[in-house]
């Protein structure tokens, strides 16, 4: 794999599960005043990263100010918060300061979803993932559901259900870091049909994946950089991105990623 698979300042790697989790949250939450998506979508390599920066090719420094939404505070003079999704890395949730850091989040909105990014080496086992769910319950969440962020349909359904129920809910997005799979998960890259691509830019603008680039008149995939996560396939409206894993179920793809990271 090429050097482009390594993270740079503020840019998620190809195949990063944090990118997939953010997109699922963004799609489920929708737009409009009173709907807030905040928190930290970073990792141990990139560091702190605003959620929107995970799909920004230029990184957090390129984000417009209106996208840099901080966590709302109780009693703030801003518009009332109807629903809030707060992203938190698994290491931060497990930390001793999590209770105090998340205390205000539970009070800012009638509906709060704690989106836990479970991608570190500590979350590669069933026990490690279940421990994160239990930790979320300890911190005051009414329930905790584990989903694969790359299973976009199920992730969307789980988030939609959580956003409809008043209270605080936890959704644990469990999928190993792309860097943990390097060298073990030799996934074939996706392909873009150069004859059918309409150059709508959606694959690159929505996902912000560094493995996708515009080579006029169409988009191309860097075969060496592609991690085989198939996230771009899910968001291509014209269905011109093809995956060698099209016959695999989401569960089979998830098992392959975990198996590679555990080696």
Image (cartoon, rainbow, N blue to C red):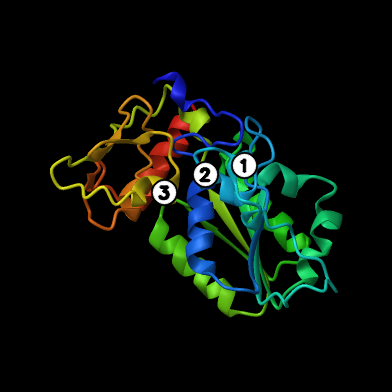
Tell me the quadrant of the picture where the N terminus can be found.
top left
Please give the name of the residue rendered at 82% of the width and 55% of the height, measured from the top-left corner: 101
Measuring from the top left, give residue 212's x and y in whole percent.
Answer: 36, 37
State whether residue 244 appears in this view: no
Residue 133 or residue 119, whichever sits in front: 119
Q: In the drawing, does residue 109 fall left or right of residue 116? A: right
Q: Say which mark, if any, is on residue 60.
A: 1
Please give the name of the residue rendered at 50% of the width and 34% of the height, measured from the top-left corner: 13
Measuring from the top left, give residue 63's x and y in whole percent.
Answer: 60, 47
**SS under mark 3:** helix
Residue 46 or residue 199, whichever sits in front: 199
**Whole-number angstrom distance, CA of label 2 to CA of label 3:** 8 Å
Q: Say which mark, if any, is on residue 173.
A: none
Placement of 169 over or under 148, stated as above or below: below
Q: Residues within 10 Å of mark 3 (few under 14, many from 20)?
A: few
> According to the image, label 3 marks what residue?
205
**Whole-number angstrom distance, CA of label 1 to CA of label 3:** 15 Å
Q: Quadrant of residue 244?
A: top left
């Amino acid at each position: 794999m090429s050097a482009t698979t390594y993270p740079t300042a503020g840019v998620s790697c190809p195949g990063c599960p944090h990118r997939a989790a953010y997109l699922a949250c963004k799609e489920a939450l929708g737009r409009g005043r009173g709907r807030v998506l905040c928190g930290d979508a970073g990792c141990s390599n990139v560091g702190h990263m605003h959620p929107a920066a995970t799909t920004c090719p230029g990184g957090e420094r390129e984000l417009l100010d209106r996208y840099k939404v901080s966590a709302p505070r109780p009693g703030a003079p801003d518009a009332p918060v109807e629903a809030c999704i707060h992203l938190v890395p698994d290491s931060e949730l497990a930390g001793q300061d999590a209770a105090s850091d998340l205390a205000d989040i539970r009070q800012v909105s009638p509906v709060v979803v704690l989106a836990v990014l479970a991608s570190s080496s500590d979350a590669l086992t069933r026990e490690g993932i279940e421990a994160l769910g239990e930790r979320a319950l300890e911190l005051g969440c009414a329930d905790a559901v584990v989903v694969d962020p790359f299973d976009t349909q199920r992730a969307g359904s789980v988030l939609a259900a959580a956003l409809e129920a008043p209270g605080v809910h936890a959704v644990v997005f469990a999928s190993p870091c792309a860097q943990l799979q390097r060298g073990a998960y030799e996934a074939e890259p996706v392909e873009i049909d150069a004859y059918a691509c309409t150059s709508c830019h959606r694959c690159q603008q929505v996902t912000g994946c560094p493995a996708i680039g515009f080579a006029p008149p169409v988009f191309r995939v860097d075969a060496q950089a592609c991690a085989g996560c198939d996230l771009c396939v899910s968001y291509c409206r014209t269905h011109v991105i093809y995956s060698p894993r099209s016959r695999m179920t989401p569960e089979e793809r998830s098992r392959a990623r975990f198996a590679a990271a555990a080696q």
